[in-house]
Amino acid sequence: MAQAINTISPLSVAGVTSKETHNQNGGDFLSVLKASLEDVNEMQIQGDKALRDIATGQVKDLHQAAIAIDKAEISMKMMLEIRNKALNAYKEVLRTQI
């Protein structure tokens, strides 16, 4: 009787799996972090453009503009939460006695 083996898929960051990141960038954390920050920045730029288009009346598709603004907001909130968690972990490491 064959047993099913549960496998866990690699962690995906900004649409790139960890194996792909490791192969492309040598797997260093800094390059993954930079790519993620660049993605968030690009979403912010697109959201700002959509907001400007709405304000000036140049919007072609109101729904797409609203989606771009929401994506920018959600990506910024996610980045801030990750930053907060990283800072809390750093502070916890500093409090650890050796």
Image (cartoon, rainbow, N blue to C red):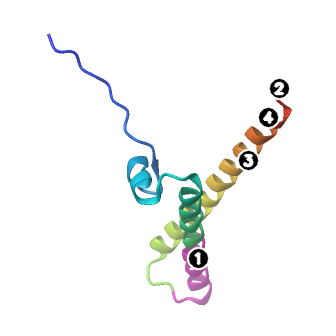
Answer with mark 2 or mark 3, whichever residue precedes in sequence. 3
Q: Quadrant of the C terminus?
A: top right
Residue position marked by numbered label 1 in the rendering:
45
Kindly identify the amino acid type of the residue bearing the numbered disc 4.
Glu
- Which residue bears the numbered disc 4? 92
Circle 4 crowding by C-alpha within 10 Å: few under 14, some 14–19, many from 20: few
Mark 2, other Cα within 10 Å: few <14 / some 14–19 / many ≥20 = few
Instruction: Between residue 41 and residue 90, name the one nearer to us.
Output: 90
N-terminal of the pair, mark 4 or mark 1, is 1
Secondary-structure class at tag 4: helix
The mark nearer the N terminus, 4 or 3, is 3
Judging by the rendered image, the residue that carries numbered circle 2 is 98
Over which residues does the magenta segment extend?
A: 44-58
Whichever of labels 1 and 3 marks the residue nearer the N terminus, that label is 1
47 in magenta: yes
Question: On screen, 11 above or below 32?
Answer: above
Q: Nearer the viewer, residue 11 or 95?
A: 95
Would you name the residue on which mark 3 appears? 84
* The quarter of the displayed image where residue 69 is located: bottom right
Q: Residue at x 57, y 68 (%)?
A: 38
Mark 1 near mark 2, Cβ–Cβ under 8 Å? no
User: Do the CB atoms of the residues marked 4 and 2 lie less than 8 Å apart?
Assistant: no
Tell me the amino acid under the disc marked 3: Asn
Viewer-nearest of discs 4 and 2: 2
Q: How far is mark 4 from mark 3, CA to CA?
A: 12 Å
Mark number displayed over residue 62: none
User: Which marked residue is nearer to the observer: mark 1 or mark 2?
Assistant: 2
Q: Residue at x 22, y 15 (%)?
A: 3
